[in-house]
Image (tube, rainbow, N blue to C red):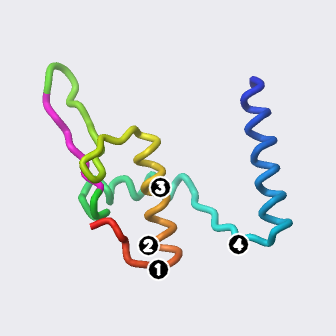
Amino acid sequence: MNSHFTDLLKMIAGLELIVDKEQITNKAISNKLVAGLEGTAREGKIAGLVFKKEAGKGRPKQQWIFKDRLLSEHEKDALIVFWIYWVRILKKEWPFY
């Protein structure tokens, strides 16, 4: 472990304290759910999120694109988490068509 992990734990504890003290509704989304929905996103079932595989030398290049912007893996995961929260938990229509 390093100091960054300790800082992360302190930050999580602080957020948990604020959520409890302010009585904020907390919705947990597991990593398994995000990983499972990556397949759904690859099939184009999350509007606006596009997966492209480009052939080149060696291994094919994989790219995630949202609204004409190239995404990193972390941005793609954050977008999927937001989709889960917005569409599955809040039961609202996905605004990014």
List the residue tagged with mark 1.
91
Asked whether disc 2 touches disc 4, contact meaning CB atoms under 8 Å apart, the reply is no
Residue 84: horizontal and vertical position, in percent? 47, 65
Spatial CA distance of label 2 from label 3 is: 13 Å
- Given this view, does label 3 or label 1 mark the residue nearer the observer? 1
> Of tags 2 and 3, which is closer to the observer?
2
In primary-sequence order, the first of circles 2 and 3 is 3
Q: What residue type is labelled 4?
A: Thr
Write the start and end of the magenta stretch as one range: 49-55
Vertical side of 23 occupied by 60: above or below: above
Q: How crowded is mark 1: few (under 14 residues within 10 Å), some or many (20 or more)?
A: few
Residues at badges 2 and 1 in contact (C-beta under 8 Å)? yes
Q: Would you say the magenta stretch is mainly helix, strand or loop?
A: strand
Residue holding disc 2: 87
Q: Which residue is drawn at 84% across and 58% down?
A: 17
Asked if residue 47 lies left or right of residue 34, the reply is left
Q: Which residue lies furthest to the bottom in this view?
A: 91
Q: Between marks 4 and 1, how big is the CA–CA gap?
A: 16 Å
Image quarter of residue 56: top left
Between 85 and 40, the residue placed more toward the observer is 85
- Say which element carries label 3: helix
Residue 25 numbered mark, or none: 4
